[in-house]
Image: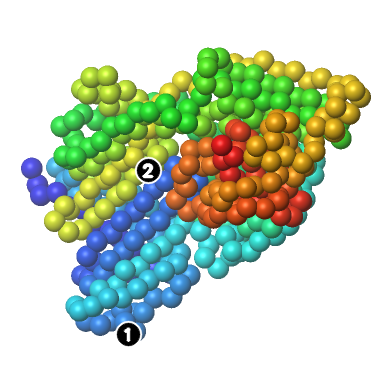
């Protein structure tokens, strides 16, 4: 067999810079994520000729398009190329001696307001795709929408950047979003989980120190959703699944269709990632995030897995390696019982009386949206209710603390509370227990 070769070709601001970069390249890493954040690259360069601190000094916002190339990798006389996407330089640094540059790129337009400008805006009588098109236009990129149509009567963007707002909206209805090659991509992970596997892997393919884990912590066997829309004088009820681990949810909805989507999204999102497998193997350029692989030969650990993240690294003694973060494809809960009923005037009055001031030790019941809430101890604040329930912050999401005092309850979900000091603006999520 001919020697295996792996290399990186690079377009820099639209020009072929492969010949200039290759002699100095120490390592290249491409991180491909399935959803929730942007793809990234990292380029490590040895600046032995001091060109990168001189005439070749990069600028933030520079555009890069790297391609992973292989030759004789899996078979003789076979050449392959894999475009990683389009990236903007968002950070670079130097250290010495000898001088070495580390350059990071992210798959978003660094010069746009996509992740920096906070805005307040109301969207009415629209749908999820149309909102995405407006967000994409403001960012100067395209929208690739591959999910069900979701009609939205009204939604508010409250002092949020477009990226955070649209990602949370997409997730709310059970879909996923990522930035890839100059596009906002919206898709249904449930559909992708049912696609055929693109590779079969055995333990012989793995490097040492792979890891597998399963846990029921933070997972549920069903969901019970109930929300009263006072403006429409309607109560929406959704139930799915059964058993003794039932997720409670009452996020605001304008109609029963929306309520059903919210309830199922909350349930299946909480259950996602029950079983995980992390491994590293010889470089596999064709294994990408959002694809599925089949694991065989590992007894009851075997099965179909979804690629949450693929990290491709070239350089150093290892040559070309691919690290995979996988989650086992689990059966999603989709069968539901739904009901939309008119709220009796007596029930409305009863609810109004019960919406008095609550505290952590109040005996009047669980606080509801619009109540005031007395926080008596310092609590960690989270970006989402799911994070508060799990007690873990997802990478890239902000966190903080809520100190003792009186707050408004902006929203409730999964038994968690969103506490705010400004009644019309969302705050951070806490676990009141």
Q: Is residue 286 above or below residue 58?
A: above
> With 6 as the anchor, is 87 left or right in this view?
right
Label 1 element class: loop
Check whether the beta carbons of the residues at disc 2 and disc 1 lie within 8 A of each other.
Answer: no
Q: Quadrant of residue 171?
A: top right
> At which x and y percent is residue 91?
41, 69
The residue sitting at the bottom extreme is: 54
| Disc with the residue nearer the chain's start (2 vs 1) | 1
> At which x and y percent is residue 260?
67, 26
Alpha-carbon span between mark 2 and mark 1:
36 Å
Quadrant placement of the N terminus? top left
Label 2 crowd (10 A; few <14 / some 14-19 / many >=20): many
Which of discs 2 and 1 lies nearer the camera? The answer is 2
> With 219 as the anchor, is 279 left or right in this view?
left
Can I make out residue 18 in this image?
no
Look at 73% across and 36% down and name the residue there.
Answer: 368
Q: Is residue 298 above or below residue 46?
A: above
Where does label 1 land, which residue? 54
Q: Is 317 in front, or is 212? A: 212
Look at 89% across and 29% down and name the residue there.
Answer: 349
Where does label 2 land, which residue? 309
Can I make out residue 153 in this image?
yes
Look at 42% across and 26% down and name the residue there.
Answer: 216
């Amino acid at each position: 067999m001919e020697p295996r070769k792996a290399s990186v070709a690079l377009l820099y601001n639209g020009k072929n810079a492969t010949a200039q970069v290759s002699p100095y390249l120490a390592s290249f890493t491409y991180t491909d994520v399935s959803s929730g954040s942007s793809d990234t690259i990292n380029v490590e360069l040895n600046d032995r000729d001091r060109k990168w601190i001189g005439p070749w000094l990069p600028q933030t916002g520079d555009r890069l398009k790297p391609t992973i190339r292989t030759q004789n990798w899996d078979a003789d006389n076979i050449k392959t190329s894999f475009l990683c996407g389009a990236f903007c330089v968002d950070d670079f640094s130097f250290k010495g001696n000898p001088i070495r540059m580390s350059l990071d790129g992210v798959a978003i337009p660094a010069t746009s307001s996509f992740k920096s400008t906070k805005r307040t805006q109301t969207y009415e009588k629209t749908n999820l795709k149309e909102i995405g098109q407006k967000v994409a236009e403001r960012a100067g990129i395209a929208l690739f929408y591959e999910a069900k149509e979701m009609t939205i009567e009204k939604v508010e963007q409250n002092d949020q950047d477009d990226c955070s707002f649209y990602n949370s909206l997409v997730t709310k209805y059970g879909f996923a979003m990522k930035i890839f090659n100059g596009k906002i991509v919206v898709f249904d992970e449930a559909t992708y989980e049912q696609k055929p596997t693109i590779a079969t892997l055995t333990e012989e393919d793995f490097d040492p120190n792979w890891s597998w884990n399963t846990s029921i912590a933070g997972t549920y066997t069903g969901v019970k959703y109930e929300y009263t829309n006072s403006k429409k004088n309607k109560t929406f009820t959704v139930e799915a699944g059964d058993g003794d681990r039932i997720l409670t949810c009452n996020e605001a909805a304008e109609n029963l269709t929306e309520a059903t989507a919210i309830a199922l999204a909350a349930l299946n999102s909480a259950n996602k990632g029950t079983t995980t497998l992390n491994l590293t193997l010889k470089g596999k350029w064709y294994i990408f995030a959002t694809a599925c692989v089949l694991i065989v030969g590992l007894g009851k650990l075997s099965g179909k897995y979804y690629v949450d993240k693929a990290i491709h690294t070239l350089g150093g003694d290892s040559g070309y390696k691919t690290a995979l973060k996988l989650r086992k494809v689990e059966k999603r809960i989709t069968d539901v019982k739904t009901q939309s009923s008119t709220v009796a005037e007596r029930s409305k009055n009863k609810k109004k009386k019960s919406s008095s001031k609550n505290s952590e030790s109040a005996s009047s019941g669980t606080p509801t949206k619009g109540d005031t809430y007395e926080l008596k101890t310092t609590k960690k604040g989270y970006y989402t209710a799911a994070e508060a329930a799990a007690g873990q912050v997802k990478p890239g999401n902000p966190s903080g603390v809520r100190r003792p005092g009186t707050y408004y309850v902006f929203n409730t979900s999964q038994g968690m509370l969103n506490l705010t000091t400004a009644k019309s603006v969302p705050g951070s999520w806490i676990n009141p227990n």
